[in-house]
Amino acid sequence: MAGLFDKVEFAHGPATANRFTLAPLTNMQSNPDGSLGDAELHWLKMRAGGGFGITSTCAMHVQPSGQGFAGQLGCFSDDLLPGLTRLADAVRGMGSVAIAQLHHGGSRSDSSLIGQQPICPSENVEFGAREMTSAEVEESVEAFIAAAERCKRAGFDGVQLHGAHGYLVCEFLSPETNRRTDNWGGSLEKRAQFMMEIVGGIRSRCGEDFHLGVRLSPERFGMVEEEAVQFFALLVDSKKVDMIDMSLWSVFKESKSEYYLGQRLIDIFTNLHRGDCRLSVAGRLYNGDDAQRAIDAGADVVAIGRAAISNHDFPKQVRANPHFKMRETPIPVEVLRAEGLGEAFIEYMRTWRTFVGE
Ligand SMILES: Cc1cc2nc3c(=O)[nH]c(=O)nc-3n(C[C@H](O)[C@H](O)[C@H](O)COP(=O)(O)O)c2cc1C
């Protein structure tokens, strides 16, 4: 039986010392120009030192037009390289594998931050976003690949393409948000084209020793499990991707889709053929027992979000006590500060129901 503290090897890039990944977590602690803020560095360095085998950055925008959050760390320009290099060095210096999450907010980019109308695959009236021209689609593909190359130059071990949660890559995948009639829309394969071109470009331009992951979510934003399973297969069959991270929000929840009715979300994905590609899962893994249960169900890696915000050394704690549980919420502000959260991040956490106390 696989254990949480077993090493995991990947087809490309370094192995991880254990099965814990710090999930990508937006923390709004960087500078208005997208450069690394000290508070963001401090928060991530503490998690890397807390025993996470892999430490992922927040969603980092690959183009100025894709910024979704104030204080978001960016990776859209070589001017940002000094900060990205400091961050990659700090994470790797703690013995953790450094992964940069590549993001474009699509229709949900914040027009007050980007100074223009948000862009996305097809017009989105709700968000006041307009359809991208085909030249803009190509520019975006190139921006994702160039950002991966930049992260490699900064010293990251790899990148994760953010294809989840209704942002740009996910908007291309979903038939609800991608109604294009050109080569970037229509059949499932055409909707996947944006993601697959980025994946292919990153693999060929960043080389064989660079980790490439993709994050998908199978619900909401027009995504359904049946199609997520097919996107998963396209990625596995490409043999270019080292890990697919399924963002399930609740790993052991049952599927609502008629096709998978009664099956747990985790089982849908652990049952799929995955070749050399590893499977990571995220969602409500708040204690050591549930993390081990996800591995027992067949996941290779667990991505930890809120339990890593509450406890910077969650993996070390679980190693000492397999039944360790994250702190009870609401968590007092003073405790969050001691756990390495700066004021901007604490404010943001107030928008996550019942997380922050007095
Ligand atoms: C404060 C916060 C920020 C998040 N930011 C991101 C992000 O930048 N990119 C991403 O893919 N998911 C993001 N997520 C989702 C998490 O990575 C994770 O999948 C989710 O929190 C479920 O895991 P958990 O139940 O362990 O928290 C965020 C979640 C939280 C709570």
Image (cartoon, helix red, strand yellow):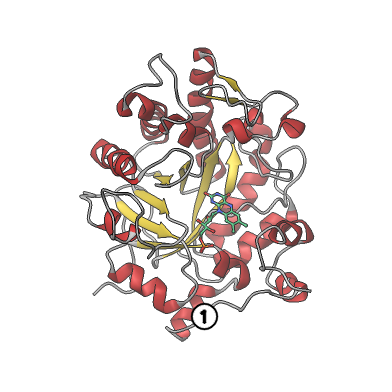
- What is the x, y in percent for residue 47? 58, 66
Q: In which quarter of the image is the N terminus?
A: bottom left
Q: Give the crowd class for mark 1: few <14, some 14-19, many >=20 residues within 10 Å.
A: some
Quadrant hosting residue 184: top left
Name the residue at 58% across, 26% down. Answer: 124
Q: Name the residue under label 1.
A: 325
* Above or below: residue 297 compared with residue 269: below
Residue 5 visible in the displayed image:
no
Task: Give the secondary structure at mark 1.
Answer: loop
The residue lying toward the viewer, choosing from 321 and 48, is 321
Q: Which residue is drawn at 45% across and 26% down?
A: 178
Q: Please say if 320 is above or below 132.
A: below
Is the residue 180 above or below the residue 23 in the image?
above
Viewer-proximal residue among 290 and 149: 290
Residue 92 picture location, percent across and down: 53, 58
Residue visible at 68% across and 74% down?
330
Quadrant of the displayed image that contains ligand 1:
bottom right
Q: Residue at x 56, y 58 (%)?
A: 91
